[in-house]
Amino acid sequence: MSLINISNLTFSYEGGYEDIFKDVSFILDSNWKLGFCGRNGYGKTTFLNLLMGKYEFKGSIVSNVAFEYFPFVVDDDSQNAVEIIENIVKDISLWQIRKELFLLNIDEDTLYRPFNTLSEGERTKVLIASLFLKENKLLLIDEPTNHLDSSAREIMSDYLNTKKGFILVSHDRYFLDRCTDHTLYINKSNIEIVNGNFTVFWEQKQIKDAYELAQNEKLTKEIERLESAAKRTAKWADNAERAKIGFDPTKTEKSKGRRPYEGEKSRKLMASSKSLQIRQNTGILEKSKLLKNIEKADNLKIHELEYFSKRMVSAEKLSIRYDNKEIFSPVSFTIERKDRLAIIGDNGSGKSSILKLINGLNIPYTGDTYIGSRLVISYVPQDASFLKGNISDFIVNNSIDETLFKTILIKLNFTKRQFDTNMENLSAGQKKKILIACSLSQKAHLYIWDEPLNYIDILSRIQIEELILAFTPTLIFVEHDRAFCENIATKSIRLSR
């Protein structure tokens, strides 16, 4: 066991508007299976980079353990996977490599294929296995599930559950619950550590938030009372100050002999007033502090159009064809008003192709399909890297309501600084939020979302989940977040080869 002692950590990026961390202190154990969560932009990846020594900071980070970071940068991806592993881990035996890959359900043939020919999921598994083969290292794993389908996430979580000594950044609640035993969460004003997985943390947070919100009305009234008392005290002291010079605007001027008495009386009243004001202001501040860590997930509103027919989309024995081959076994489904269909399957099984076909793209297929006439569709693509330029132009080009769009983004924790940033410089999670906010700003009969939650923080995921449950839009979606699928889907189809 080795402790990682973070003391009075303060950090901000050069030219940044505010501190990412300010005077934070906590202790971590290198034996923990630590889940690391928090809102987009709260500094999770930044903290991992600070542990790696990439930035200068104030305070101290003291540890006897060395760190390794995932995703690991591969310099020459034309090499075979086994060569990549041997470059990362020196003097490693082939049987040790085979053992790790077996635990991750990777065929041994994968070792002898060029790294750049592997799927994103295969690359993730190879690099994770390589880094865990290094001894006496604490692995910093930054969002490993972004390129993993549902089944691969289960395999990866089972694999991580056999390990210890890692810090895992992930927004997938189900994934975190399967492989972590402690949770580190960045709040708005502090950092919290809980002995337990994400569900344990979230249950505790809900209890705390419920208690604080239940006290909110009482606290607000108490703050108002203290503020009113502070104003009365200030007025009382002010009257005493005027009286010491022998003048009262409501009475005749007092004699000069009274002035020393009034001066001493005023001095005592002013001292008493200042002491009382300090106590009152301290009371206001202490009571206000109780509300600072509540991450309020404001309700959002969706504007769905009413379709004239019950049925919107249907397919009978549908399969997508590429190179004259069916890529999945035929499936049948019907989408009616208020249905929420989850399309489930491994990476490359054709999920996105079905969404594109329904959205009107020319996708080769077999079987029969029905797309309702004059059906208005709002589509969120999987890839958000095409977003460039300023947000104002994006609003105009997409003909969406600016006030509604920005309100949704603010509720999804977008800041004023991010509104002023060109979209190509935003994080992947912030770009996805732009696409979702755009979709929610559009009045449509049917919403089609392709992996909408990639890179998006857990609180925003829960917020979007609650929106869908509240307004019950007609939705077809692909998503590998199992908790999200289980909570919102009313029906599902699974694609198999």
Image: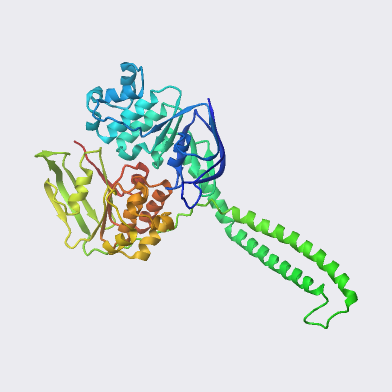
Q: Residue furthest left?
A: 324
Q: Residue furthest front?
A: 15
Q: Specify the quadrant of the image occupied by residue 301.
A: bottom left
Residue at image point 14% right, 45% down: 317
Residue at image point 15% right, 54% down: 370
Q: Specify the quadrant of the image occupied by residue 9.
A: top right
Q: Give the x, y percent position of residue 354.
A: 20, 47
Residue at image point 81% right, 68% down: 266
Vertical arrangement, residue 207 with respect to residue 124, above or below: below
Between 214 and 428, which is closer to the camera in this rendering?
428
Colour scheme of the rendered structure? rainbow
Position of the C terminus, as image quadrant, is: top left
Between 318 and 171, which is closer to the camera in this rendering?
171
Q: Give the x, y percent position of residue 11.
A: 51, 44
Q: Is 214 on the left or on the right of 470, as rendered?
A: right
Between 40 and 393, which is closer to the camera in this rendering?
393
Vertical arrangement, residue 48 with respect to residue 299, above or below: above
Q: Give the x, y percent position of residue 360.
A: 17, 54
